[in-house]
């Protein structure tokens, strides 16, 4: 009954206007058509019936919505799921949940929506703060873990372990270092645009550093390397591009058990094309279009239980920022070739 009374109060101006219209209708009719007054009364009764049906129909919906709104409001308020501001909490205590004291359904709905919006806003702030704290922790952990990794590398270099055991330990240490660098890169990826420093770099120097870092893996797996001299200058960011080179080399080495890796470069218009080709197990045709997707490991990844599907995803994101195009060709059981189309510094920086 309370909600029906509130509904009628909201519709009071409309009802008064209707009553005034009927009154004027009857007054004018009685003055000019005295004999038809009964017919006019009958017409007024019919309109009143139609209006009554419309009011009951609309009122039922109004009451239903109001009850649902009050129910939802009470649930959130009593369960503590809404995070109220001090002013809204005070208003809540003084007006018995605000909904009952509201003059209209629209006002009640506005109160509830403002509270729900505030709840979502505070929840987003809390989630953002937690994400920031988590990011800061990972960043700190990544930087701190580099110290023991470097110490372990020094100890291994000075150890008297047999050659093969020393190589295997260094290889595993390199894997730890790669995974650590991957975490750091993943954290920095959001701010990569502000971190890029595009300069002219000697492609051969970048390649030799990346190959040298994986020299242990080449030796332990008895893989050959073909890296001819080249004099190409590319426009890129040394740190981010080197990370991608190391990831691509690591993947080629991981899935190549015999034969080796061939690296070559040539010019094409305003770009330098860099090819990294291996004689590994290859990639299935159905997996090839998805190898750069986040978390995708494919058939090869399921064979290698340590695959995360993150390395190539990071490479794709970085290449997009470095304006590097990627093409991949592979044949299962034959090998894989990845071709990078890199901006040619000599052409890009010409006056």
Image (tube, rainbow, N blue to C red):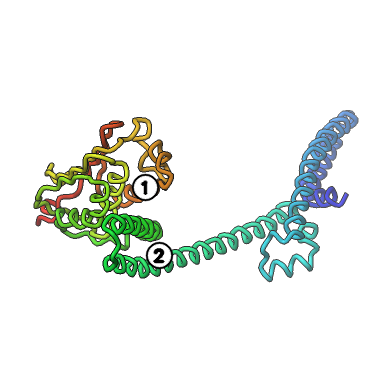
* Residue in the picture at 77% in, 46% down: 14
Mark 2 secondary-structure assignment = helix
As drawn, 71 above or below 40? below
Residue occupied by mark 1 = 313
Report x, y in % for residue 89.
Answer: 72, 67
Of labels 1 and 2, earlier in sequence is: 2
Q: Splitting the image into 4 quarters, where does residue 33 fall?
A: top right
| Viewer-closest of 50 and 114 | 114
As drawn, 182 above or below 15? below
Image-based side of 301 in relation to 165, left or right: right
Mark 1 secondary-structure assignment = helix
Report x, y in % for residue 277.
Answer: 22, 40
As drawn, 197 above or below 19? below
Mark 2 surroundings: few (<14), some (14-19) or many (≥20) residues within 10 A: many
Residue 189 appearing in the image: no
| In this rendering, the label closer to the viewer, 1 or 2 | 2
Mark 1 surroundings: few (<14), some (14-19) or many (≥20) residues within 10 A: some
| Viewer-closest of 304 and 2 | 304
Report x, y in % for residue 140.
Answer: 42, 68
Q: Splitting the image into 4 quarters, where does residue 332 fall?
A: top left
| Viewer-closest of 171 and 202 | 171
* Residue in the picture at 40% in, 65% down: 142
Q: Quadrant of the C terminus?
A: bottom left
Residue occupied by mark 2 = 142
Q: CA distance from mark 1 to mark 2?
A: 20 Å
Image-based side of 234 in relation to 327, left or right: left
Report x, y in % for residue 112.
Answer: 69, 56
> Pointer 1 and pointer 2: residues touching (CB < 8 Å)?
no
Q: Splitting the image into 4 quarters, where does residue 327 fall?
A: top left
Residue 196 appearing in the image: yes
């Amino acid at each position: 009954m309370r909600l029906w009374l509130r509904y009628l109060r909201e519709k009071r101006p409309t009802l008064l206007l209707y009553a005034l219209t009927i009154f004027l209708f009857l007054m004018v009719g009685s003055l000019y058509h005295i004999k038809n007054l009964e017919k006019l009364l009958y017409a007024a009764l019919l309109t009143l019936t139609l209006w009554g049906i419309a009011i009951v129909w609309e009122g039922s919906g109004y009451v239903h919505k109001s009850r649902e709104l009050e129910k939802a409001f009470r649930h959130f308020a009593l369960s503590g799921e809404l995070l109220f501001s001090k002013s809204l909490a005070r208003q809540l205590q003084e007006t018995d949940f605000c909904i009952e004291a509201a003059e209209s359904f629209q006002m009640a709905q506005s109160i509830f929506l403002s509270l729900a919006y505030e709840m979502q806003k505070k929840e987003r702030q809390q989630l953002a703060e937690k994400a920031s704290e988590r990011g800061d922790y990972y960043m700190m952990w990544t930087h701190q873990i580099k110290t023991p990794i470097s110490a372990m590398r020094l100890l291994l270099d000075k150890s008297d372990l047999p050659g093969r055991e020393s190589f295997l330990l260094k290889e595993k240490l390199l894997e730890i270092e790669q995974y650590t660098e991957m975490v750091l890169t993943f954290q920095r990826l959001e701010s990569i645009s502000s971190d890029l420093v595009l300069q002219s770099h000697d492609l051969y120097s970048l390649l030799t550093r990346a190959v040298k870092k994986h020299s242990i893996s080449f030796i332990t797996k008895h893989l050959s390397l073909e890296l001819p001299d080249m004099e190409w200058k590319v426009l890129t960011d040394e740190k981010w591009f080197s990370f991608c080179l190391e990831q691509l080399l690591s993947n080629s080495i991981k899935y190549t058990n015999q034969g080796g890796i061939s690296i070559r470069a040539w010019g094409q218009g305003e770009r330098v094309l860099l090819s990294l080709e291996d004689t590994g197990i290859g990639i299935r045709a159905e997996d090839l279009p998805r190898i750069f997707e986040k978390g995708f490991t494919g058939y090869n990844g399921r064979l290698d239980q340590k695959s995360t599907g993150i390395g190539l995803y990071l490479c794709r994101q970085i290449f997009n920022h470095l304006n590097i195009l990627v093409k991949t060709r592979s044949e299962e059981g034959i090998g894989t070739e990845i071709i990078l189309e890199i901006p040619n510094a000599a052409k890009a920086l010409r006056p």
